[in-house]
């Protein structure tokens, strides 16, 4: 009895069924069900756009670009502190935020922030 179970399980795993048989159709159905019924966040491997980018480093400092949504809704007084926390999380080291300048487009909307940091 146990030998028959392992033999069937082995055939199932190794896909040892003729094409067009009900076992083959069952396998294809299970694969399709897995593909289409698995929730999107199950594997958590969705691509994410870069929100903080290191642009250049010179004279002992680094320049970073921060996406505008990172500081959206943060009051002006708290933007430097929030930017410092985000940059330290990205660089994985303590930094000193020297400048944080908003970048504006032609319609005066913020398209990002430039941060000058020192280690």
Image (cartoon, helix red, strand yellow):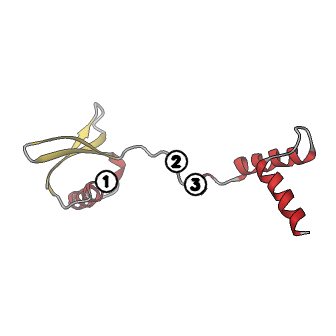
Q: Horizontal and vertical percent for residue 87? A: 26, 55
Classify residue 89 as left or right of residue 47.
left
Give the label on residue 43, or none: 3
CA separation, marks 1 and 3? 28 Å
Marks 1 and 2, the one that precedes in the sequence: 2
Above or below — where is 20 with respect to 34? Answer: above
Task: Indicate which label's residue lies in the foreground, 1 or 2.
Answer: 2
Out of 113 and 55, give the one closest to the viewer. Answer: 55
Q: Quadrant of residue 50?
A: top left
Q: Which residue is mark 2?
A: 46
Which quarter of the image is occupied by the N terminus? bottom right
**Neighbour class for label 1 at 10 Å: few (<14), some, many (≥20)?**
some
Q: Residue furthest bottom?
A: 1
**Neighbour class for label 3 at 10 Å: few (<14), some, many (≥20)?**
few
Q: Horizontal and vertical percent for residue 6? A: 83, 62
Q: Horizontal and vertical percent for residue 9? A: 82, 58
CA separation, marks 1 and 2? 23 Å
Which quarter of the image is occupied by the C terminus? bottom left
CA separation, marks 3 and 2? 8 Å
Give the label on residue 71, or none: 1
Q: Residue furthest front?
A: 3
Residue occupying image coordinates x 81% and y 44%: 28
Q: Horizontal and vertical percent for residue 26? A: 86, 49
């Amino acid at each position: 009895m146990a030998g028959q179970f392992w033999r069937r399980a082995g055939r199932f795993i190794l896909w040892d069924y003729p094409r067009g048989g009900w076992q083959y159709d069952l396998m294809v159905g299970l694969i399709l069900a897995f593909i289409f019924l698995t929730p999107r966040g199950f594997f958590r491997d969705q691509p994410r756009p870069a929100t903080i980018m290191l642009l250049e480093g010179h004279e002992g400092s680094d320049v970073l670009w921060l996406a505008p949504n990172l500081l959206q809704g943060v009051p002006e007084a708290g933007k430097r502190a929030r930017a410092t926390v985000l940059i330290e999380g990205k660089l994985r080291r303590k930094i000193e935020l020297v400048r944080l300048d908003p970048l504006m487009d032609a319609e005066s909307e913020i398209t990002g922030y430039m941060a000058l940091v020192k280690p």
